[in-house]
Image (cartoon, rainbow, N blue to C red):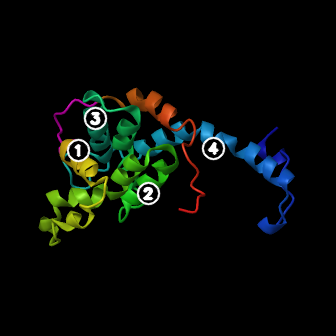
Amino acid sequence: MNEKDAPRALFTKMEDGTKEDWSLIIDASLHFFTGATERIVSHLKLLHGGYGGFAVDRLEHSLQTASRAFRDGRDEEYVVCALLHDIGDTLAPANHADMAATLLQPFVSEKNYWMVKHHGIVQGYYFFEHLGLNKNLRDSLREHRYYSATEEFCRVYDQVSFDPNYESMPLEAFTPLLESVFSAPKKSIYTSD
């Protein structure tokens, strides 16, 4: 049976939905979780060829960042964050870090979520002055408990990953890590905090 012919909810306004309606919706939506890795890999591939003036394209930058973290023995969640930290570049260039962090939020620790969300500002230390911005803008975040982890990510993995001669791991090498991290949310995004 194709999706069009499958049973569907009967409400036309959410406020009129029933438990049975929502059960149908949940069952029909499960494929979005099972296919997450494929969709993420497809979106990462969109970064290929997008140099944006850099020495390597955005996919290679992501692969270098993740490869360096993997080779340093970082855990799979951290490596996935390194791989996906710039995935928002194509759809949200003005706030790419927010997009990547939102994608990762239900699946990673608070620390890794914060690191991805704020890496753009912390990374600015290495180039903001060339854009007429304050390179020390990151100092406004310095008191946060995850600042040092974010600064380390930027210094050790992100800002050094524009090397055309670096031998990155292939994207396929990261598929098992993506499948593991995105297999189930660690927490709900629907909380009051």
**Residue mark closest to the camera, 2 vs 3:** 3
How much space separates mark 2 and mark 3, taking CA atoms? 21 Å
Q: Which residue is mark 2?
A: 99
Dot 1: what SS? loop
* N-terminal label among 4 and 3: 4
Q: Are marks 2 and 3 in contact (CB under 8 Å)?
A: no
Q: CA distance from mark 3 to mark 1?
A: 18 Å
Q: Which residue is mark 4?
A: 32
- Tell me which label, 2 or 4, sits earlier in the chain: 4
Please state the total of marks drawn on the protein image. Answer: 4
Q: Main secondary structure of the magenta part?
A: loop
Q: Quadrant of the N terminus?
A: top right
Task: Give the camera-side residue of 48 and 148.
Answer: 148
The nearer-to-camera label among 4 and 1 is 4
Q: Measure how far apart labels 1 and 2 are at the Cα level.
A: 22 Å
Q: Nearer the viewer, mark 4 or mark 3?
A: 3
Q: Nearer the viewer, mark 3 or mark 1?
A: 3
Residue extending farthest to the left is: 130
First to last magenta residue range: 157-168
- Label annotation for residue 152: none
Q: Does residue 13 appear in this view? A: no
Identify which amino acid the numbered label 3 is placed on. Answer: Ala
Residue at label 1? 56
Density class for disc 1 (Cα within 10 Å; few <14, some 14-19, many ≥20) is many
Which of the 4 image quadrants contains residue 186?
top right
Q: Secondary structure at mark 2?
A: helix
Tell me the residue at 27%/43% (across/down): 61
On screen, residue 178 versus residue 167, left or right, reads right
User: Where does label 3 land, which residue?
Assistant: 69
* 145 in magenta: no
